[in-house]
Image (spheres, grey):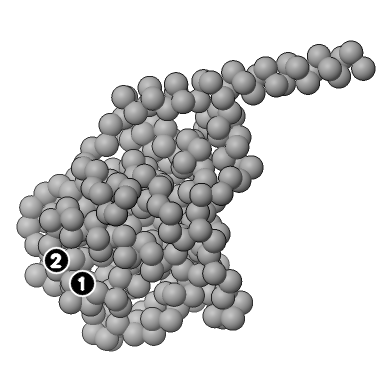
Amino acid sequence: MLWLGASLALLLGLMLVGYIFEPVAEAADARAYPPPGQMVDVGGYRLHINCTGTGSPTVVIDAGWGDSSASWSWVQPKVAKSTRICTYDRAGMGWSEASPQPRTAREYANELHTLLAKANERGSFVLVGHSMGGYTVIVYAHDYPTEVAGLVLIDSQALPKSDVANSKPAPKPGGTSLPSLMARIGLVRLLADPLGSIQNLPAGDKQAYTASAVTPRGVQTFTDEGMGMSEGGTQARAVTTLGALPLIVLSRGKDQDADWAASQAGYLKLSTDSQQLFADHSGHRIMIEQPDAAVAAIVKMVEMVR
């Protein structure tokens, strides 16, 4: 039994060391990777928005589930050669502070609307949504139609097939999940290794992406976003038409099964002025795996609505 007590003491000691080390590491990362844009108060918490380039319409990008604005580092400078472009971090992701509100598409859209207004960014906007971000921009275009000139859906998450099956309301964030507890003792940071296409980001952006993703805030927000995704999908599914709003659906060419292909084609029904493009050499994260395809689709939309 002595070995059991010694093992437990060692484990508790390591957890204590990790608990002390984690905020020190977070502070070091904050110094090493300051926000490239501005922090804007949207009602008791601040969101990060980074706008570059000049011209109209302004492109606004909403990242996918768990992704930060750093994931668009290949795309933003190229689009900025043609027009103004803003990337931002949803509450709790990247450099943004956490929100007390449920993580759903409508809440994201409302927060983004407030953020753009307080950052003095004026429409009309071309909204770009990747993966789960597609839900947000669809709801935004529905709720604020006079502000939106066009929509680009980049391999957007499939809509739920039934409202009933996804009617459970999203919980308010701020709970403590097992992954976030692991992050508080530094275990997520210790084990972190950028997965998949994130490895293909520029070095500084990859490190900034990882630095925010491994924090307790980032890990908990990832969990909260996942728990709110069903309700967000139901909110987007309720938008049956956007009229004649120009719409481009950019879909991946690799690893696409029949259900995913059908969901991508289904988005074309949102508008009478829609078209589908393909990133033939890319998987889901087109903005990293085939960024030129994402740039081309966005710039094409900008030129269409000018």
> Measuring 64% from the left and 23% from the top, which residue is drawn there?
15
The answer to which image quadrant residue 265 occupies is bottom left
Residue under pointer 1: 148
Front residue of 306 and 65:
65
> Measuring 54% from the left and 80% from the top, which residue is drawn there?
163
> Measuring 38% from the left and 81% from the top, which residue is drawn there?
239
The N terminus: image quadrant: top right
Q: Amino acid at mark 2?
A: Gly
Q: Are marks 1 and 2 in contact (CB under 8 Å)?
A: yes
> Measuring 12% from the left and 62% from the top, which residue is drawn there?
122
Q: Furthest-left residue in view?
A: 55
The C terminus: image quadrant: bottom left
Residue under pointer 2: 123
Helix, strand or loop status at disc 1:
strand
| Rendered location of residue 75, percent (x, y) | 26, 49
| Rendered location of residue 126, percent (x, y) | 21, 66
